[in-house]
Amino acid sequence: MVVPTARPPLTREAIVDAARQITIVGGMEGLNMRRVASSLGVTAPALYAHVRHKSDLLQAIAEGELERLVEHFEQVHETDPVERVRRYARIYVEQALEEPELYQVLFLTQPSLTLDQGDDLPIASKAFSLPATATIEAIESGAFKPADPLMASLTMWTAVHGAATVLLMGLELDDASTDELVTSVVETVIAGLSA
C-alpha cells in the first residue's frame, strides 16, 4: 500500500516565498493567486487564510527584499563615513542587478524620509536611514560640505537609483563598463558633496 506523503502545512512564509520565485521568473505581471496556489499544490482559496490579495503578496515580497538590502548594509563596518556612502551605493546597485524583477517590487513600499535610526523603524525607512546616517556623519566630520542632510542623502539615492535603472534597461554593458558607470555616478556625487 502506498501512503501519500503529507504536504507541509501552508504558511504565509511559504506563500510569500512561492510568490517571490514566480516574480523572479515572470515579473509582477506574472504573479497571480492561482499561479501561487498551483506552485504550492493547493487551491487559490486556501491562500486567503494567510494573505489578503496580490497586493499583500507584493508588499510582503518588497519587505523581504528591503530586509535583504538592510542586512547587506549592516555588513558595512568602515569607520570612514564617505567610504560607507560608497559601499551602500554599490550594494544598492548590486542588489538591483542580482534580481531585476524583485528590484521593481521595492518601489511598492514608500519609505518615510527619516534620518532617525532604530530597530522600530519600518523596513523601508531603515533602508533609507542607514545610508543617510553615513551622509550625516560625513557632513559633521567635514568630509562633505555643510548641506541639508536629507537633500544630500536623497541626491545620492537618486543617483544610484538612476544608475541601477539605466543598467537594467538592457544596454548590454560588460562587467567593466558596468563598474565604470557605477563608479562614475557615485564618485561624481561624492565630489559634489565633498568639502
Image (cartoon, rainbow, N blue to C red):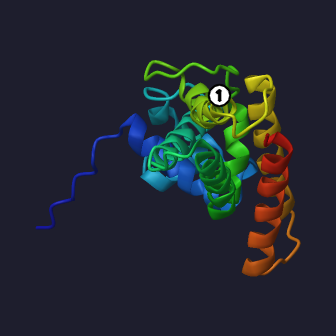
Q: Residue at x 52, y 22 (%)?
A: 117
Q: Residue at x 45, y 48 (%)?
A: 77
Tell me the quarter of the picture where residue 90 sits.
bottom right
Say left or right for 185 vs 48: right
In this view, 175 is above or below 123? below
| Residue 190 point in image, percent of width and height | 78, 48
Q: Residue at x 61, y 26 (%)?
A: 125
Say left or right for 143 vs 190: left
Q: Which residue does the numbered mark 1 point to in the structure image? A: 140
Q: Which quarter of the rendering shows the C terminus? A: top right
Q: Amino acid at mark 1?
A: Glu
Q: Which quarter of the rendering shows the N terminus? A: bottom left
Q: Do we see residue 168 in this rendering?
A: no
| Residue 148 point in image, percent of width and height | 79, 22
| Residue 191 point in image, percent of width and height | 82, 50
Choose between 2 and 163: the one closer to the eye: 163
Crowding at dot 1, Cα within 10 Å, few <14 / some 14-19 / many 20+, comes out as: some
Choose between 95 and 17: the one closer to the eye: 95
